[in-house]
Image: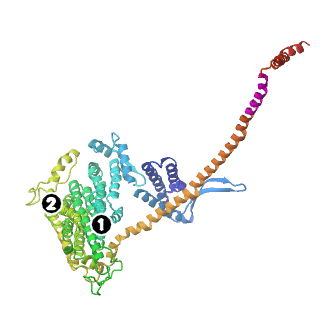
């Protein structure tokens, strides 16, 4: 470690070289620019952290800081020393800056995934990215046989494991897995159709499907390096549990669904990480339907409540109509963070099942599917298959985390349904809400059957009594493809313990949620869980302050870096250099213009003047007079005699 101290002067060099290369040569190619930038900060990180930890682990290092001299610049009577110093203050900054800068670059446009793709391209035989070749078993075995040593960590692993982990970071970003989950709830701020599209069937599914599509690679990586699949499974399981805790303490009807989406994506990732290829993929499909139903249902709810607020006799939150009488169920609010005019806040709802029956019942169907209501809903069959597969592979920790997440999912689903559709209206907006038009309710009616019946096409053949009654269409379709990919997927036997767990977390969570919120919010607007859990509830409500952590670390650092780069670009370095080049260019142009005007043009003009004057003189000898021609002849003979005969005569003399 001590040897790294002498490399401290190198720390700013790689990012600066990357900066110069991008500015001068690579800025038109964003992909290459991103890789070069990431490479620059990665090299600085590899140099910086060993320096920092060498300082941290050296006793009394602060008493003897390290000084290094690079070169001196003569300044007349003395010289200017250029060098570096390593001390504890610098080491702490190296620890923070190198790491955060690397994380920021990793967080951006999927660079790690692209790095994995490039390694896959480079090391595959032949070098290609076509699925047919890179996922062929001989190529995967070839990659598994290649060994690599990771610098600093001293870990030796296979090239296939490195590629699998790098590509998985694309899933972490695209499917909002911890710690890159914070973007997805913010994405629900847009219009509801966009939210439904993003959260159900398109964008967020891409990350999970990336693992599904590349599963042969992960299968072989798991066979040769089990830690790879354990990493995938634990990230998914932790994300599912983490997001479920947050969803329990949210008020925004769409935000609850957003964190639910993160949790369900975690389910899928965890399933794939434990080898439950079919179960994870099946849950991806069923979730798309019931989550799309829920998001569109929430949009219909918001639409109805918002119109109800406009139609109410009194302003939302006033609690009285035009005659001074109490409004429809409007009660005194105790939560200071409540906006009485927010149509998305579930505290401003209640009793909407009577006002909006189509939206209400279809939302309840989607909610029961999300909660995994036994035997009927699609969510039950896909979740139960995940439970069975995970239990079959003895991943007990993952199983417990997913079971707790499922319990919380059923609980916050019951909470959402109860606060939104049951009990009494709590605001004028809810009291005056009405059903949405058929353009909004018809899609809900058409999707709702899929949230129920789609699961029946994935019932395991060995499930008691009903197994095999409806063909397992999903497994039948995928069976030949699984054989083609030369992978094995678990086919767990029926286990009563798994079924009991599934029933307990689903029905128990729904019952508990209904019991806690069955009366709505009778005691003002204070959530019962908030009273019971106190600071724990507040931590869940504030999303465990992960957003704040990013806002106080990565965001200001990024803004500061951007401002610093702006100063470099516009104030200190780039613009002054460009302006200096422009000034020098203008000076050169002025000098060249003067040289052209006074030298080149002067010579040319002088020759022209001489030619003109000579022409004027010679023109007189061609005026047609015999006397002039005779004079010219006499002069010419005289000149010839002077030039030829006279020198000869003078020589003889």
State which region is magenta: 607-622
Tell me if residue 24 is in the magenta stretch. Answer: no
The residue sitting at the top extreme is 652
Residue beneath label 2, please? 453
- Element under label 1? helix
Report crowding for label 2: few under 14, some 14 to 19, many 20 or more residues within 10 A (C-alpha). some
Q: How was the colour assigned to the protein in this rendering?
A: rainbow
Image spot of residue 474 (x, y percent): 17, 53
Q: Is residue 387 visible from the viewing direction of this image? A: no
Residue beneath label 1, please? 259
Tell me if residue 611 is in the magenta stretch. Answer: yes
The residue sitting at the front extreme is 625
Image spot of residue 615 (x, y percent): 75, 28
Residue 87 marker: none
Image spot of residue 535 (x, y percent): 34, 77
Q: The C terminus lies in which quarter of the figure? A: top right
Q: Is residue 53 visible from the viewing direction of this image? A: yes
* CA separation in Å, label 2 and label 1: 25 Å
- In the image, residue 37 sits, relative to residue 564, either above or below, namely above
Report crowding for label 1: few under 14, some 14 to 19, many 20 or more residues within 10 A (C-alpha). many
Task: Please give left or right for residue 112 compared with residue 60 in the image.
Answer: left
The residue mark sitting in front, 2 or 1, is: 2
- Element under label 2? helix
């Amino acid at each position: 470690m001590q040897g790294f101290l002498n490399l401290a002067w190198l720390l700013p060099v790689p990012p600066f070289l990357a900066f110069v290369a991008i500015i001068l040569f690579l800025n038109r190619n964003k992909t290459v620019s991103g890789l070069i930038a990431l490479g620059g900060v990665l090299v600085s990180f590899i140099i910086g952290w060993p320096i920092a930890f060498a300082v941290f682990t050296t006793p009394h290092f602060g008493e003897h800081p390290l000084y290094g001299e690079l070169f001196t610049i003569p300044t007349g009577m003395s010289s200017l020393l250029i060098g570096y110093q390593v001390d504890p203050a610098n080491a702490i900054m190296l620890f923070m800056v190198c790491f955060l800068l690397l994380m920021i670059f990793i967080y951006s446009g999927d660079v790690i995934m692209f790095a994995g793709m490039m390694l896959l391209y480079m090391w595959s035989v032949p070098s290609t990215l076509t699925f047919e070749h890179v996922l062929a078993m001989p190529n995967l075995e070839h990659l598994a046989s290649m060994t690599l040593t990771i610098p600093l960590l001293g870990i030796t692993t296979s090239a296939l494991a490195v590629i699998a982990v790098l590509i998985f970071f694309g899933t972490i970003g695209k499917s909002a897995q911890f710690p890159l989950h914070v973007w997805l709830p913010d994405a629900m701020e847009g219009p509801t159709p966009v939210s439904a599209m993003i959260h159900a069937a398109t964008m967020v599914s891409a990350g999970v499907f990336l693992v599904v599509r590349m599963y042969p690679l992960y299968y072989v990586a798991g066979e040769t390096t089990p830690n790879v699949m354990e990493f995938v499974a634990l990230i998914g399981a932790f994300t599912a549990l983490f997001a479920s805790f947050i969803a329990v303490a949210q008020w925004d009807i769409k935000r609850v669904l957003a964190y639910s989406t993160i949790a369900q994506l975690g389910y899928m990732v965890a399933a794939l990480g434990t080898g439950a290829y079919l179960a994870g993929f099946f849950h991806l499909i069923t979730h798309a339907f019931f989550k799309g139903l829920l998001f569109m249902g929430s949009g219909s709810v918001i639409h109805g409540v918002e119109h109800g607020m406009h139609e109410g006799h009194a302003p939302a939150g006033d609690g009285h109509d035009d005659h001074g009488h109490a409004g429809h169920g409007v009660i005194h609010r105790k939560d200071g963070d409540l906006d009485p005019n927010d149509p998305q806040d579930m505290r401003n709802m209640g009793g909407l099942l009577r006002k909006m029956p189509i939206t209400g019942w279809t939302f309840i169907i989607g909610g029961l599917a999300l909660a995994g209501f036994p035997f009927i809903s699609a969510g039950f069959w896909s979740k139960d298959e995940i439970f069975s597969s995970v239990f079959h592979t003895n991943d007990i920790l993952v199983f417990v985390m997913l079971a707790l997440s499922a319990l919380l999912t059923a609980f916050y689903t019951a909470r959402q349904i109860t606060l939104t559709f049951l009990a009494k209206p709590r605001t004028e907006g809810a009291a005056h809400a009405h059903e949405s038009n058929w353009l909004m309710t018809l899609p809900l009616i058409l999707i709702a059957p899929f949230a129920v019946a789609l699961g029946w096409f994935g019932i395991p053949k060995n499930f008691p009594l009903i197994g095999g009654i409806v063909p397992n269409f999903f497994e039948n379709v995928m069976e030949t493809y699984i054989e083609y990919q030369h992978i094995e997927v678990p086919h767990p036997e029926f286990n009563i313990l798994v079924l009991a767990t599934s029933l307990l977390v689903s029905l128990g969570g729904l019952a508990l949620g209904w019991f806690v919120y069955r009366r709505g919010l009778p005691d003002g607007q204070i959530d019962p869980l908030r009273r019971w859990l106190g600071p724990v509830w507040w931590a869940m409500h504030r999303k465990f302050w992960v957003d704040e952590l990013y806002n106080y670390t990565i965001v200001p650092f990024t803004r500061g870096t951007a401002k610093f780069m702006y100063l470099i670009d516009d104030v200190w370095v780039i613009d002054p250099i460009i302006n200096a080049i422009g000034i020098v260019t203008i000076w050169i142009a002025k000098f060249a213009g003067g040289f052209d005007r006074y030298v080149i043009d002067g010579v040319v003009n002088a020759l022209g003047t001489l030619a003109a004057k000579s022409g004027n003189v010679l023109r007189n000898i061609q005026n047609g007079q015999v006397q002039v021609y005779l004079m010219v002849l006499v002069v010419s003979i005289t000149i010839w005699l002077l030039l030829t005969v006279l020198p000869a005569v003078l020589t003889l003399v």
